[in-house]
């Protein structure tokens, strides 16, 4: 063990002395270059020389101990490795290393979640806060001017609300709105923004945890109250979400439509199998709707079941055609080389669900977005960690878990797998939990690659 530690120290000093990887003992200096976007790093040559000389001294001591041991077995391999490192260290020590210029991978700036600009109203005008409870036909609105009493709830149609907001903006007021994300999409948000309002969309929450009453007026009033606190600086009052652009929303919808048509194929195919099982107590082959299978099957089933299946066949074939068309569209989006087990379809779906990978500042935000963080209960001296909270994008979570099961076979050199691989051999329960942990790490690694923070090779992936 002592010899291994010495070898690690030598390797550490060697890496510090290389020109192409100045990761230790470096002094950063900024070089203004808007076109090339480069960073200049100045190595402290004196410290590197000191580390090289110290490593060479330890090298000689290791060689003497290896000679005394007779260079047998593991110690012989250690001695051979230290000799190779010695040649590299001498070569690195003779090469001047005053300054080394490397090109940093550009990283796009992250997108703020909370609005940074707060417009001020005209003289004599107010900041109007609107809490919106959105329904399919009407919108219940509670209004507050500055810090006055919140007015009673009023009903608007989407068009009348947008027109009312536009009038208030023209009068010089500043209008803030907030509503919970729902199945109606973000059309109302974009209309309000187009009218000049400051619109916020939040994740669905339980607005009143104490009272056993709920209606549109109470919800709109609670949202208006929380909006006032949010504008006063209490960011935790509203769980604001990032609203995707129209292009991002449409790109994401392509993958979800493909998943819908896949489920339709499975549903219709299972319905056909259930029909024959009910009336003949026999099953159907896997792809019973294809021309080859149907030619043999049509003469083997009774007329009633055949008539029913003939109605299902065109529906299954149409759904399958839609899946194939959407699959081709998604795969065309990815043109770069990818690791084995991580195909173009997976990357297209990942990028579509992430909308914009540059909106995340760190790996914790990425892990939280997919909902693979452990739940927690802690009070006083009691602290318990539970299963994942599933508080995130379920489509992305399912995609990553399926991908990890493939990577277990195709990417044994993946760094995360090598670090957690021993847990996969313990048992079925621990194996599944480990796969969830690897899914979270896979999302982080894909984010690092797509934002330029790392390469496939640095993460241990093998490119096809």
Image (cartoon, rainbow, N blue to C red):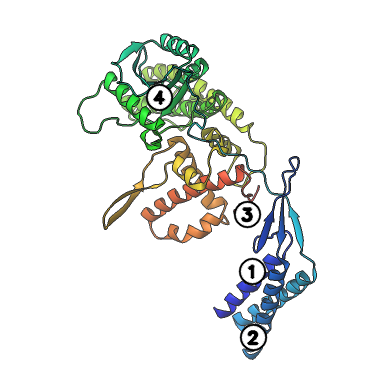
Question: In this rendering, which labeled residue sits more in front, label 4 or label 1?
Answer: 4
Which residue does the image show at 53% across and 41% down from the upper left? 360
**How far apart in space, not on screen, are marks 4 and 1 (Cα)?**
54 Å
x and y, in percent, of residue 65 in the image = 63, 87
- What residue would you read off at disc 3? 458
**How far apart in space, not on screen, are marks 2 and 1 (Cα)?**
21 Å
- Residue 296 visible at all: no
Compare marks 2 and 1 and give the one earlier in the sequence: 1
Q: Identify the image quadrant of residue 226.
A: top left
Question: In this rendering, which labeled residue sits more in front, label 4 or label 3?
Answer: 4
Compare marks 2 and 4 and give the one earlier in the sequence: 2
Q: Identify the image quadrant of residue 348.
A: top right
Q: Secondary structure at mark 3?
A: loop
Q: Is residue 393 left or right of residue 41?
A: left
Question: In this rendering, which labeled residue sits more in front, label 2 or label 4?
Answer: 4
x and y, in percent, of residue 73 in the image = 61, 82
Mark 3 and mark 4 in contact (Cβ < 8 Å)?
Answer: no
- What residue would you read off at disc 1? 12
x and y, in percent, of residue 17 in the image = 71, 66
Compare marks 1 and 3 and give the one earlier in the sequence: 1
**How far apart in space, not on screen, are marks 1 and 3 (Cα)?**
17 Å
Question: Residue 66 has which mark?
Answer: 2
Which residue does the image show at 64% across and 89% down from the upper left? 70
- What residue would you read off at disc 4? 178
Q: Secondary structure at mark 1?
A: helix
């Amino acid at each position: 063990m002592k010899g291994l530690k010495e070898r690690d120290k030598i390797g550490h000093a060697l890496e510090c002395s290389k020109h192409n990887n100045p990761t230790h003992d470096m002094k950063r200096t900024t070089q203004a270059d808007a076109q090339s976007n480069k960073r200049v790093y100045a190595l402290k040559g004196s410290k590197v020389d000191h580390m090289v000389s110290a490593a060479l001294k330890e090298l000689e001591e290791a060689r003497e101990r290896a000679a005394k041991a007779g260079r047998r077995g593991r110690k012989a391999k250690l001695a051979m490795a230290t000799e190779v490192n010695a040649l590299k260290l001498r070569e690195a020590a003779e090469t001047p290393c005053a300054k080394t210029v490397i090109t940093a991978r550009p990283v796009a700036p992250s997108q703020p979640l909370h609005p940074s600009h707060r417009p001020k109203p005209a003289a004599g005008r107010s900041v109007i806060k609107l809490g919106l409870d959105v329904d399919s036909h009407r919108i219940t609105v509670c209004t507050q001017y500055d810090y006055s009493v919140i007015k009673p709830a009023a009903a608007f149609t989407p068009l009348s609300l947008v027109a009312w907001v536009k009038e208030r903006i023209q009068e010089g007021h500043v209008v803030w709105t907030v509503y919970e994300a729902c199945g109606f999409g973000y059309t109302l948000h974009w209309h309000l923004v187009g009218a000049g309002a400051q619109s916020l969309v939040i994740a669905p929450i339980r607005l009143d945890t104490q009272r056993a009453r709920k209606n549109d007026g109470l919800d709109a009033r609670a949202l208006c109250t929380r909006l006032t606190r949010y504008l006063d600086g209490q960011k935790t009052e509203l769980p604001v979400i990032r609203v995707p652009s129209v292009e991002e929303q449409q790109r994401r919808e392509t993958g979800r439509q493909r998943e819908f048509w896949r489920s339709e194929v499975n549903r219709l195919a299972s319905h056909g199998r259930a029909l024959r099982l009910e009336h003949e107590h026999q099953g159907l082959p896997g792809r019973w709707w294809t021309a080859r299978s149907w030619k043999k099957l049509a003469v083997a089933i009774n007329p009633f079941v055949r008539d029913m299946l003939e109605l299902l066949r065109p529906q299954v074939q149409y759904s399958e055609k839609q899946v194939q068309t959407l699959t081709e569209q998604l795969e065309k989006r990815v043109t770069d080389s990818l690791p084995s087990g991580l195909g173009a379809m997976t990357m297209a779906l990942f990028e579509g669900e992430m909308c914009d990978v540059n909106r995340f500042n760190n790996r914790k935000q990425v892990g939280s977005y997919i909902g693979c963080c452990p739940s927690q209960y802690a009070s006083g001296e009691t602290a318990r960690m539970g299963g994942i909270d599933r508080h995130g994008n379920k489509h992305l979570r399912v995609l990553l878990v399926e991908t990890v099961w493939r990577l277990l076979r195709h990417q044994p050199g993946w760094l995360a797998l090598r670090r957690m691989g021993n847990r996969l051999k313990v048992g079925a329960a621990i194996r599944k939990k480990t796969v969830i942990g690897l899914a979270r790490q896979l999302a982080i690694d894909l984010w690092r690659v797509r934002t330029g923070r790392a390469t496939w090779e640095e993460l241990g992936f093998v490119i096809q």
